[in-house]
Image (cartoon, rainbow, N blue to C red):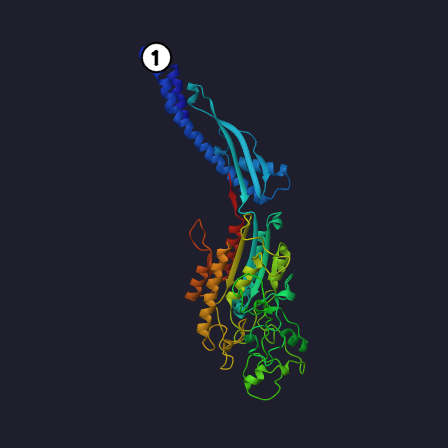
Amino acid sequence: MSKVLFRARDRFAKDQSGNVAILFAFSAIPLIGLLGGAVDVTRHHRYKAELLNAMDATAIALVRSNPASDADADAFVNRYMATMMPGGNNDRTLHMAAFDAIAVEGGYRVVSNGYMDTAFMPVVGISDMPLDLETEVRTTGGKYEIALALDNTGSMRNFGRIEALRDAAEQLVDDLYREEGTEDRVEMALVPFVTAVNVGYSDGFDRANFIDPVGADPVFHTNFSDPTVSRLDLFTRMKTQWAGCVEARIEGDEDGDLLPDSQASQWVPYLWPDEPDSGFTNSYLRDSGTGDVYDHLRNIGKYTVNRAPTNTSNLGPNAACPGKVIPLTNDADLMKQEIRKMKPHNQFGSNNSGTNVAQGLVWGWRALSPDTPFAGHEGVEYDDEETTKVLVLLSDGRNQIVANDEITESDYTSFGYLADGRLGTTNNYLTAEKNVDAKVSRVCKAVKDTGIRVYTILFQVDFEKTQDLFRNCASVNEKTGKPYYYYVPDASALETAFHDIGEDLTTLRVTR
């Protein structure tokens, strides 16, 4: 089109046929300037848009390439732009200087200047139009604190779930620490959970001030005949180490992140009581004394080494206690190492204490809190404008209280036995599960109210109420209006979910 108009202009300039032609030529000059100028302006807008789009793509590619030096960055940008210039770099009306790459925090700025030859505006004295262009690409948000609260219950051994979770979570760590210097702005925490969470031997946990070995509330002694007995002393008597799991708090900030302010609001060591020798799932000591099965359950005289107690993650006082919490750290290798250690706890159908999403969720929150009990690993204040706090919650099952027998009514959990009444009932596991769901909803709201962004992942669970629970727990993407909720039916979808989360947290944004 521009060539046709150029030829028309030249013909007008050479036409000498009569006065009418001369008059028309004079009147045509401003007409050509006006109409042709519109063509030149349109071309200028198109060139500018195409160049800026090419520079955006180039800057994104540059940041991801992680150049070793400023010279390498400049060379990369000019090579990349050479393949993306409008007209394939053959348009002789476009004149651009070399492209410069300027490092900025979290990304690069790409700049260049030049001009475009005009086709018609020279008739009014304008031979070119400037193109002074700049784009800037940065990562999205600077600093991050990210807690992974991941289900390690027995059902995770089914269908390769735990293997898929390890792979996907490890890849997320790689994605988050992919760029050089990320360790200065990204910290992560790992919170494996079953029915309880292991904080007692986590780095920096203040056991002296935050653990009550006796339990100030009488409910903690329901299953032990001596109300003054220290649970840690019972472990000592058995010559067995407390693995570090704690029970849910009863008083104080049960479902929140505040530190204990009294003995009653401290955490009590988790100890699954030795159960009677016959008909119970977790009998690891020989019964002693006389009486009925409840007397045998409560008798603390048997907590000795009268025979070596079995003590594994599937049997013994630490049954259903997962691996330890890893508080906030910028050590990506440590995170991946601990993720690799995750394993399903308790064989399905044997000492299967169930799933307690509420405890995994609340300890994920505590791992991000500025009031965390992990000394030296506290999160920043919630209103810190430079830091985005993120909690990723994954489970492969609904909240479950496993029914057992008429004495205890369930397997042991971080809320004790169902018969202990800490979940609003002593014998109805459906009511108890409903109450745990309600805890999850309360904690989710409280977490989101602090500004923490919550991603939820439900792995191979077709239970509609649980899907609704996780969907409602997730934060909402302000741009799309959709929750950060993933339902994943298989291992491939799980990998995609974690990859999407990593991309969402590390995506490069054009900030020009």
Work out which residue is located at the far bottom of the displayed protein and give it. Answer: 290
Which is more toward the observer, 310 or 217?
Answer: 217
Q: Is residue 474 visible?
A: yes
Work out which residue is located at the far left of the displayed protein and give it. Answer: 20
Q: Is residue 175 visible?
A: no
Q: Quadrant of the N terminus?
A: top left
- Please determine whether, in this image, residue 118 is positioned above or below residue 471: above
Work out which residue is located at the far front of the displayed protein and give it. Answer: 262
How many numbered discs sit on the rendered protein?
1
Label 1: element kind: helix
Which is more toward the observer, 435 or 8?
Answer: 435
> In this image, 314 relative to 404: left or right?
right
What amino acid is found at the position of numbered circle 1 in the picture?
Ile
> In this image, 473 relative to 139: left or right?
left
| Residue 112 in the image, given as x and y percentages of width and height | 54, 32
- Please determine whether, in this image, residue 208 is positioned above or below residue 287: above
| Residue 356 in the image, given as x and y percentages of width and height | 51, 68
| Residue 67 in the image, given as x and y percentages of width and height | 61, 42
Taking the spot 57% from the left edge, 45% from the top edge, the residue there is 64
| Residue 8 in the image, given as x and y percentages of width and height | 38, 21
> In this image, 124 relative to 254: left or right?
left
Residue 274 placement: quadrant:
bottom right
Residue 466 placement: quadrant:
bottom left
Work out which residue is located at the far top of the displayed protein and give it. Answer: 19
10 Å crowding of disc 1: few (<14), some (14-19), many (20+) = some
Mark 1 sits on what residue? 22
Taking the spot 45% from the left edge, 76% from the top edge, the residue there is 428
- Please determine whether, in this image, residue 459 is positioned above or below residue 500: below
